[in-house]
């Protein structure tokens, strides 16, 4: 998992590479056209000459009518060049670089600022990483079928499980659609197969589209990686986890618990709280006592005091979907 800065640099590199490809392809096509059409160079030289004349007229303060006549003359020359190309089987635009982003012409910069195409590509790279990290890929709230949740009454919540889950998913959708750096931390708990990961990935997709950097990683993958690389001088995954605008740490309880894992977990929780960076945790552990026993009172207290609890109810909807 790469940091936001690494993704940004990769996006810039890819934009620069596609500009180079566009320019190279246009140059190759231009060389081919000039070889096939001897008169093409003369037509282009005439356009250039008329351009210099226009510049000189403007510098000398020529009348508006004179400058307009010069513009029209140059336009006629351009049209003659286009007609020459078409007569020989070439579309005029084939000789121009086919930039993917017309706003910055694949330079990555527009009006002195980073072009939106670089940011969009950076978000797509992050989306690709999330897709690779999850068997579900980035999901959508629209694909969550609340009809799969049971319609029986739950006395603890004063409504049916289906009604409760409908309200819960709508609240999570609103969380994603209004996400900013002031958003609360969430601790989503519930038995396996109730859609916690699906909902977390749906949040990731919406928040990414809103321009924020999102890291999604399973607890098992993250802590196994940190354990494996614990003696490395630098760890880009830890850097990415600590620095993301939104971290989604999925499936707490599936990781192999060690003292080093607990130390890393506390560092993540504490650092992100101090930096006021929102985090979403999901877990199949629904018993608070078991959670505290597994992660220590210190970590459980930090999570409990900083997270909005979200309970998922119902039966294994994955099993129902398969049926």
Image (cartoon, grey):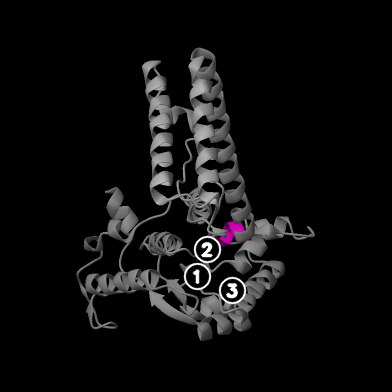
Quick check: 14 above or below 78?
A: below
Figure quadrant of residue 225: bottom right
User: Circle 3 — which element?
Assistant: helix
Pointer 2: what residue?
213
Q: From the viewer's perspective, tell me whether residue 199 is left or right of residue 255.
A: left
User: Circle 2 — which element?
Assistant: loop
Contact (Cβ within 8 Å) of mark 2 with mark 3: no
Mark 2 or mark 3: which is in front? 2
Residue 51 x/y as whole percent: 51, 38
Quick check: 30 above or below 212?
A: above
Pointer 3: what residue?
294
Going from the N terminus, do you reach mark 3 or mark 1 first? 1
Point out which mark residue 281 bears: 1
Q: Quadrant of the N terminus?
A: bottom right
Mark 1 or mark 2: which is in front? 2
Quick check: 202 above or below 270?
A: above
What secondary structure do most residues of the magenta stretch adopt?
helix
Residue 32 x/y as whole percent: 53, 18
User: Circle 1 — which element?
Assistant: strand
The residue shown at (54%, 80%) is 303
The residue shown at (58%, 59%) is 220
Query: Camera-side residue: 16 or 11?
Result: 16
Going from the N terminus, do you reach mark 2 or mark 3 first? 2
The residue shown at (22%, 73%) is 163
What segment carries the magenta color? Answer: 218-222
Figure quadrant of residue 222: bottom right
Q: From the viewer's perspective, tell me whether residue 255 is left or right of residue 69.
A: right
The residue shown at (59%, 73%) is 294
Contact (Cβ within 8 Å) of mark 3 with mark 1: no
């Amino acid at each position: 998992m790469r940091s936001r800065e690494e993704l940004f640099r990769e996006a810039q590199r890819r934009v620069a590479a596609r500009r180079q490809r566009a320019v190279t392809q246009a140059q190759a096509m231009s060389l081919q056209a000039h070889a096939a059409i001897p008169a093409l160079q003369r037509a282009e030289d005439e356009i250039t000459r008329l351009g210099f004349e226009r510049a000189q007229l403007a510098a000398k303060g020529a009348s508006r009518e004179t400058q307009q006549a010069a513009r029209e003359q140059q336009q006629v020359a351009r049209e003659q060049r286009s007609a020459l190309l078409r007569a020989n089987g070439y579309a005029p635009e084939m000789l121009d670089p086919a930039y993917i982003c017309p706003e910055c012409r694949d330079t990555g910069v527009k009006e002195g600022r980073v072009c939106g195409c670089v940011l969009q590509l950076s978000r797509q790279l992050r989306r690709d990483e999330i897709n690779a990290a999850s068997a579900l890929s980035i999901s959508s709230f629209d694909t969550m079928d609340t009809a799969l949740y049971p319609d029986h009454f739950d006395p603890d919540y004063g409504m049916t499980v289906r009604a409760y889950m409908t309200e819960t998913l709508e609240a999570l959708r609103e969380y994603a659609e209004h996400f900013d750096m002031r958003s609360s931390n969430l601790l989503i708990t519930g038995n396996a197969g109730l859609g916690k990961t699906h909902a977390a990935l749906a949040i990731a997709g919406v928040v990414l589209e809103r321009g924020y950097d999102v890291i999604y990683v399973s607890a098992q993958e993250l802590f196994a990686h940190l354990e494996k690389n614990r003696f490395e001088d630098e760890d880009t995954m830890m850097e990415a986890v600590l620095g993301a605008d939104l971290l989604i740490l999925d499936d707490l309880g599936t990781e192999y618990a060690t003292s080093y894992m607990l130390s890393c977990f506390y560092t993540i929780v504490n650092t992100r709280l101090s930096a006021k960076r929102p985090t979403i945790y999901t877990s199949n552990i629904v018993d608070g006592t078991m959670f505290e026993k597994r992660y220590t009172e210190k970590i459980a207290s930090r999570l409990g005091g900083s997270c909005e609890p979200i309970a998922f109810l119902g039966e294994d909807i994955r099993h129902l979907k398969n049926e």
